[in-house]
Image (cartoon, coloured by chain):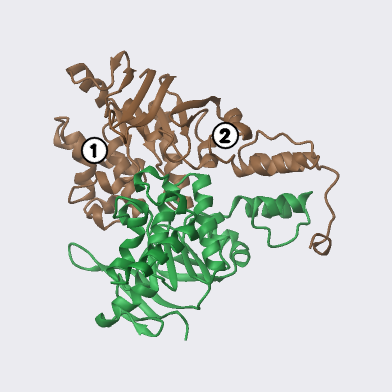
Amino acid sequence: MPLIELRGVEYAYPLDGGGQVAALRGIDLTIERGEFVSIVGPNGSGKSTLARHLNGLLLPTAGQVCVDGLLTSEPHNLWAVRQRVGMVFQNPDNQIVASTVEEDVAFGPENAALPPDEIRRRVDEALATVGLIGYRSSPPQMLSGGQRQLLAIAGLLATRPACLIFDEPASMLDSINRRLVVEAIQRLNAEGLTIVLITQTMEEAAAARRALVMHQGRIMLDGSPAQIFEQGDQLREWGLDLPTAVEIAHRLRSMGWRLPPDLLTIDQLARALC
Amino acid sequence: MLIRVEHLGHTYIPGTPLARSALRGVNLEIGPGERVGLVGRTGSGKSTLVQHIAGLLTPTEGQVLLDGVPAHERTAAGRAVRRRLGLAFQNPEEQIFEQTVLREVAFGPRNLGLSQSEIVARARWAMEMVGLDASMASRSPFMLSGGEMRRVALASILAMRPETLILDEPTAGLDPRGRRELIARVCAWQVETGATLILISHDLEGLARVVERVVVLDCGQVAADGLARQVLSDDARLSAAGLDVPQPVMLLRALRNSGWGVRTDLLLPEEAIEEIVHARRGAIPVRTDKETA
């Protein structure tokens, strides 16, 4: 059984003056356990709407979403669905609730009414995983933006989800904090966690093993990042671009340079050129 | 507008164990019509600095003068000079509150006591400036996507016709085309009006296309101030301030370290490509896929 399965999902937002706007149209998508999927697409293409269907924050107006075999449209399934699929939002400050780092991470397990030593174990483990164990007694506002995002991630890890969904987790961060968050995501995936990463930064999308491109509520492309980036002209038409390394490699190739395929990063490109 | 930042210091919650110094001894002069990029890691004091320039905070040390008037001054002169300056915050949804896009954009001009037709004309001009379709005018700003909300927030500031525009991360959350378009529109607006533009951004490559001058903040102090090309290609200085150089610079530096005779102060992909082609002209690498694998 796949971890997440969407069949014929449609979603329409109601408009104030009556009528509605279609945000998702006929989405069929299967995400297996352990996958790392990135979702890119222009603003308004339905990425965030899709993400909010993956743990029942939104329910489809047609079609169905199954998480670990549980239909999100059944109200009694929602608790179990959200235990399996956690969501990290753009602004970490919106999901930090406590006055110290470890209390914040303990919030989820406490609400699950776990015994104190189990809570302690999970908090330590989650903080160690994201590298914040040294900050356990710090107030969250003393952390950098990237560290606060890591704290939000730790808070979810302590609830032991099977999948984490990241909705543009690094868009408010500088390049180094951004790298911190993306590296943490890669590490979590290597440890078996299923990851869905929504991003506007093509360099981040390239970190995933599978990338989806959305446009006007539909999934238009589904493949490895290298396969997706071969459709450069198509991506540009949809308002997207290529990672800088891929763009430079494309243009050099078009001038007759022979370069290996699948160059996704500046490091890889530099090595190929030298 | 001449902006002078003199020995500016700011401490949050002073006199408590949580006191945190956000700015220390900042000196800066920004002349009329300049386009300046302000960069620095998260928490380096960028947002605090521009809030001082906009007169929203009272300095704990030093001062900010706008055409000679202290920016935070609670006098008629202070209010008048602040009105000539517009600041767009990071989270547009926090400054949006009206029922329709048009009303939202028209809010500022309406408070200037302009005629109804002038208010609407300004609002429509500002919407066009940021690329919001006229058909959006009657929609609720809260039903828009993040990128559209950002444009609404920017339009509502442009409608005030500021002489100085400060944008705090204007393109975060926008898709690549949205980013390019917004920046192109802001540039066109700046050229048309000759306004001063101060841009905070983590996207150094995007910034390199817009500003001539870059100021780097690190731990509340000015760590570098100079031509964009020099400052943004200075690997040692940027990494000391917790930033990465733009990717084209990264590539050129890697090539140079392997013995290529390339310049490393080219910030844009197209410049880097030209330099690479130039350096290898007549010596196109003929390595095959197999050999590099």
Q: Quick one: which chain is brown?
A: B
Q: Quadrant of the N terminus of chain B?
A: top left
Q: CA distance from mark 1 to mark 2?
A: 48 Å
What residue sits right under mark 2 in the picture? B240
Q: Chain of mark 2?
A: B
Q: Would residue B84 appear left or right of A190 to someone viewing this image?
A: left
Please tell me whether residue B94 is drawn above or below residue B50 in the rendered image. Answer: below
- The green-coloured chain is labelled A
| Mark 2 neighbour class, 10 Å CA radius: few under 14, some 14 to 19, many 20 or more | few
Look at label 2 and name its amino acid: Ala
Task: Name the residue type under label 1.
Answer: Ala
Label 1: state its secondary structure. helix
Residue nearer the viewer, A27 or A206: A206
Q: Residue B6 in the image: x percent, y percent?
A: 38, 16
* In the foreground, A256 or B117: A256
Q: Name the mark on residue B215.
A: none
